[in-house]
Amino acid sequence: MFEGDEDRWEFLELMRECCREEGVTVIAWCLMGNHVHLVLADYEDRMSAAMHRLLLTYARRFNKRTRRTGHLFQNRFDRRSLDTDWQVMEAIRSVHADPQEAGVSLIERYPWSSFAEHLCAYDGDAADVARGFSDPSCVLELFGSAEGFIAYSLSTPDGSKPALCDMKETEWERNVFAGKLAKSLGVPLNGVKTAPPAQRDTVIVGLNNAGFTVRQIERYTGIGKSTVSRIVRARARTAMRAGGNVM
């Protein structure tokens, strides 16, 4: 389904647009290599219309960009009803856990799911929430706290202990991951603050795209929150203008 990050952003922007216009709320999402998982609230029975438009439009754009022909999606999407809070919670956990269960990435490190968006909502960063592709209100209500959300998300269906139940350890792991990501983008994490603007901006946007909040980037790089927010917003506006020209 996706040849690169450009395709993933294209799909997410289309998902947001199609669901909003049909009155469907995205609660959770996860993009995998050959399939997508979504948890949706569909009070007006408009899910089929939203998904038909999303999949058809994305397939046309993908085929045009890659010069391929034929069907991109093998079958019509599958849907199942969630009738209780517990079922919704389990669906959210399952969607976020798919990369880990597939051996692709740990849940908290995978950049193409709504897991990081929900953590941003618990952080209370309105700017980060506004840029997200899911509505966090359902998650905020169901799990109550960031600790509760993380513990449930990292737990297993049989009720055993979470894979990473120590919050300090998780934060340490994220810091290490941030360092590796910054280095892969050409600047060590402790050198981002003094790097040339172009390199600095690339690392900041890369960290944000990987799920790090503005506050975390500020903490890890020493760059002020206002500067980080300005860089992220500027790059988002540039991406939206570029996306608006895609037919």
Image (tube, grey):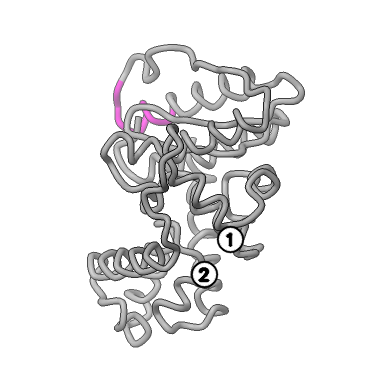
Furthest-right residue in this view: 44
* Residue bearing the label numbered 1: 128
Identify the main secondary structure in magenta.
helix
Question: Magenta region: which residues?
Answer: 61-68
Task: Establish if 196 lies above or below 89.
Answer: below
* Foreground pick, 172 / 110: 172
Helix, strand or loop status at disc 2? helix
Query: Could you tell me which residue is drawn at 55 percent across and 17 percent down?
Result: 79
Identify the image quadrant of residue 169: bottom left
Query: Could you tell me which residue is drawn at 35 percent across and 39 percent down?
Result: 99
Q: Is residue 56 left or right of residue 33?
A: right
Quarter of the image where the N terminus is located = top left
Instruction: Give residue 34's mark.
Output: none
Lower sequence index among marks 2 and 1: 1
Query: Could you tell me which residue is drawn at 53 percent across and 42 percent down?
Result: 13
Helix, strand or loop status at disc 1? helix
* Residue bearing the label numbered 2: 214
* Foreground pick, 235 / 174: 174
Expressed as whole percent of the image width and height from the top left, the position of residue 236 reads: 52, 59
Expressed as whole percent of the image width and height from the top left, the position of residue 40 reads: 62, 30
Binning the other alpha carbons within 10 Å of mark 2 as few (below 14), some (14 to 19) or many (20 upward) gives: many
The amino acid on which the numbered mark 2 sits, given as a three-letter code, is Val
Asked if residue 101 is among those painted magenta in the image, a careful observer would answer no
Task: Establish if 170 lies above or below 197.
Answer: above
Disc 2 + disc 1, Cβ < 8 Å: yes
Task: Establish if 164 lies above or below 84.
Answer: below
The amino acid on which the numbered mark 1 sits, given as a three-letter code, is Asp
